Image (tube, helix red, strand yellow):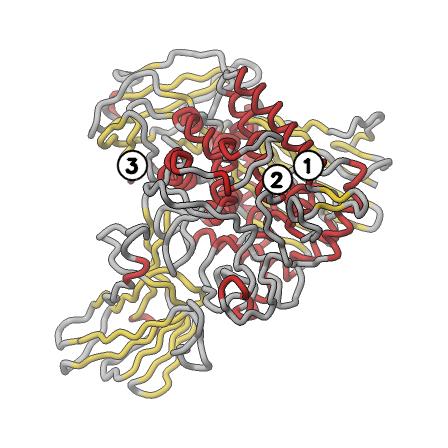
């Protein structure tokens, strides 16, 4: 009942607003800009259009130097006047602002009947040191988590479970001792009965710390020793104010002569700005619900550096990790600054795997589609051309990492031109590459055979060219758009001519290879390369391989399956209970997604790696099929493939407001209730063919395959 009540509150928040005025104001993607320094001299403003307004027809923005002036209708900095426009996201300020200055703004809009709403509440923000181009970062959050379990082993020995693994430290309050003493504290991610596991293995964290206490002092913030590997070199450094933090769930305290209760100790947790109430998912499958909770929490818990990093072992951003992180973040919170800052970090900090670099262009594209803001793409457009790896192409337009030169490495952003990129396909590799004693000698590559012309690399290259054509079109670069579109088609043809075994109807691992792996087939299927006549054979092969990929590869395997209409099989993978599943992570005791399916598949695996959180975007984006089809969610598509479920409820945050939906499968009837926020177009695409459809109580006389939904609540019955 509690979950149903929470959903009701969320739906009410999504469907109503006080006085029918604009809400959800943001400056530079930031919801509470008074907590940060805006770095853009002409920042962008966004707001949520009330559902009752339907579609905005005009707006007026006022910016003032003081709140009192704005309350008196004095916009001494900028008054846009009444502008006939439906634009409600990423509207650029019409005046150049001064650095280190406080400002106040508000907006009112005109509805679909050309009637004005009241002004929004006033939002204030402060500029910092203004740059020619810079992405404003959001604030960090700290929360105090109380113990879920507090066991007194003896008068001086305690065991504490905070419920979830989190990055932070310990805070003691009201710790009274009559003598000087030293507490022995054990922190860890893994428990061993009523004790913190001192030898958890792999990269699972454990830390022993001594805390001196003295009479008269009652409050202590535990100071942790720094790990040289993740606090130096290429690691992302934390603010000095945060201090040293580690991931832990459990705490064991020994040698305590002080009186200690559960009220006296808290887990002090740090994350990037995150609102848990922006997203929601519930279904009839209890395993899927737990998988969603695990993955959503993983996105939040691993945001502690302000950039998407690989976890605690290195704290280094990697493009493939960031791609999964980015999408998961978009679908779980109305937050975009962290993704953009990470994208831009990779321009000058690329990593060595060939396919990782080929994630850069898709991430910039995602940023544009989810925000509607083209600034970042425009500023780094020339860099993105190189990130497609088009410079590595031979005569037939297929690329090979073996063609890289010092000049190309410099163009890609590497500080050392003598460095070299290397094809990776998936991680971890087989035993022959690492010397690890893996449970699967072929690693997570499904026995992939490497050749100079690699199928996975070229599938990514095709995807990059296709996306670059779209981005060039949006930038008004028509010649570039035409070039990339034609080049993409040539690459697609070359892949299908030279890397496809027509006899077997499946792709080989590369030129000269006779081996076919899961990866060589799932990536072409995910990226739309497979000709229609061969989709059946490719899908059949993919389904024969199971989850023969890593937690990273699972992202593309599930994308491929849902795009091919294989929802039932995809659902079975999402809810599997074998040792290559998200359920296995939960069963193992981790509350953040793991780096690998199980420790036996990667000996140094960690318990805090968000690249394992693919379901955070797959469930809303593929299973529910909610995605932007025009920049900034001005137009949305909902194409649900909910095979395996009797019911489901979901709330998806967008820059324009929340999309809320409910599904019930009762015998021969499928019922959908969908709430679309104001100022958004939406196409609902049921996959059920030759069915009778009732839309808002009326039977559809003709059905073209698409049902147009409008702001507000729509009901559909398919039977």
Mark nearer the viewer, 3 or 2:
2
Q: Position of residue 593 (x, y in %)?
A: 51, 59
Q: Residues within 10 Å of mark 3 (few under 14, many from 20)?
A: some
Is 271 situated above or below 418? below
Residue under label 3: 34
Residue 491 falls in image quadrant: top right
Mark nearer the viewer, 3 or 1:
1
Pick the residue in front: 164 or 248.
Answer: 248
Residue name at image x 42 percent, y 24 percent: 378
Residue 529 tag number: 1
Pick the residue in front: 589 or 679.
Answer: 589
Residue name at image x 39 percent, y 72 percent: 250
Distance between the Cα atoms at labels 3 and 2? Answer: 44 Å
Query: Is label 2 in a helix, a strand or a loop?
Result: helix
Tag 3 near tag 2, CB within 8 Å: no
Left or right: 287 with respect to 664?
Answer: left
């Amino acid at each position: 009942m509690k979950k149903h009540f929470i959903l009701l509150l969320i739906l009410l928040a999504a469907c109503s607003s006080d006085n029918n005025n604009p809400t959800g104001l943001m400056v530079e993607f930031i919801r509470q800009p008074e907590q940060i320094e805006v770095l853009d001299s002409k920042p962008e403003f966004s707001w949520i259009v009330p559902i009752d307004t339907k579609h905005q027809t005009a707006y007026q923005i006022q910016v003032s130097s003081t709140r009192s002036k704005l309350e008196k209708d004095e916009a001494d900095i900028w008054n846009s006047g009444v502008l006939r426009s439906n634009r409600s996201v990423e509207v650029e300020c019409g005046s150049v602002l001064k650095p280190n200055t406080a400002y106040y703004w508000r907006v009112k809009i005109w509805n679909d009947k050309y009637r004005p709403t009241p002004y929004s509440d006033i939002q204030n923000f402060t500029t910092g040191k203004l740059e020619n181009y810079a992405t404003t970062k959001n604030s960090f959050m700290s929360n105090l988590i109380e113990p879920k379990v507090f066991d007194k082993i003896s008068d001086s020995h305690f065991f504490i479970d905070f419920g979830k693994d989190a990055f932070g430290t310990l805070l003691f309050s009201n710790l009274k001792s009559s003598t000087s003493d030293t507490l022995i504290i054990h922190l860890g991610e893994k428990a061993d009965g009523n004790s913190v596991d001192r030898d958890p293995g792999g990269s699972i964290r454990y830390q022993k710390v001594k805390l001196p206490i003295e009479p008269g002092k009652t409050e202590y913030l535990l100071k942790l020793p720094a790990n040289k590997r993740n606090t130096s070199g290429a690691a992302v450094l934390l603010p000095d104010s945060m201090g040293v933090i580690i991931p832990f769930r459990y705490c064991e305290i020994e040698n305590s002569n002080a009186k200690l209760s559960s009220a006296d100790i808290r887990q002090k947790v740090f994350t990037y700005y995150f609102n848990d109430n922006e997203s929601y998912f519930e279904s009839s499958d209890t395993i899927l619900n737990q998988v969603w909770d695990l993955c959503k929490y993983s996105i939040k818990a691993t945001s502690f550096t302000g950039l998407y990093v690989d976890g605690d072992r290195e704290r280094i951003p990697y493009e493939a990790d960031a791609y999964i992180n980015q999408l998961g973040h978009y679908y779980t919170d109305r937050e975009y600054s962290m993704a953009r800052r990470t994208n831009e970090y990779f321009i000058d900090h690329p990593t060595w795997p060939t396919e990782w670099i080929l994630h850069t262009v898709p991430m910039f594209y995602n940023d544009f589609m989810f925000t509607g803001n083209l600034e970042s793409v425009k500023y780094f457009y020339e860099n993105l051309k190189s990130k497609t790896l088009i410079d590595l192409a031979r005569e037939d337009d297929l690329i090979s990492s073996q063609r890289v030169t010092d000049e190309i490495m410099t163009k890609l952003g590497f500080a050392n031109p003598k460095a070299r990129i290397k094809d990776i396909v998936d991680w971890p590799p087989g035993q022959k590459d690492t010397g690890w004693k893996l449970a699967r000698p072929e690693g997570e590559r499904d026995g992939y055979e490497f050749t100079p012309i690699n199928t996975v690399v070229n599938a990514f290259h095709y995807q990059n060219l296709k996306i670059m054509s779209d981005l060039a079109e949006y930038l008004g670069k028509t010649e570039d758009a035409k070039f990339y579109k034609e080049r993409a088609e040539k690459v697609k043809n070359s892949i299908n001519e030279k890397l496809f075994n027509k006899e077997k109807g499946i792709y080989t691992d590369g030129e000269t290879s006779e081996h076919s792996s899961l990866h060589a087939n799932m990536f072409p299927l995910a990226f739309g390369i497979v000709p229609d006549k061969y989709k059946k054979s490719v899908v059949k092969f993919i389904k024969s391989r199971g989850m023969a990929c890593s937690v990273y590869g699972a992202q593309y395997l599930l994308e491929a399956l849902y795009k091919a209409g294989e929802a039932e099989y995809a659902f079975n993978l999402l809810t599997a209970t074998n040792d290559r599943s998200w359920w296995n992570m939960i069963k193992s005791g981790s509350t953040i997604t793991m780096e690998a399916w199980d420790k036996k598949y990667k000996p140094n695996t960690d318990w805090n790696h968000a690249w394992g959180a693919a379901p955070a975007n797959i469930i809303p984006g593929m299973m529910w099929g909610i995605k932007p089809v025009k920049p900034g969610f001005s137009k949305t598509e909902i194409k649900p493939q909910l095979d395996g479920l009797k019911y489901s409820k979901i709330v998806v945050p967008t820059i324009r407001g929340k999309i809320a939906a409910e599904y019930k499968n009762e015998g021969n009837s499928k019922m959908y209730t969908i709430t679309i926020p104001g100022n958004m177009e939406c196409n609902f695409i049921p996959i059920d063919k030759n069915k009778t459809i009732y839309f808002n109580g009326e039977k559809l006389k003709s059905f073209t395959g698409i049902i147009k939904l409008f702001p507000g609540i729509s009901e559909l019955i398919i039977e």
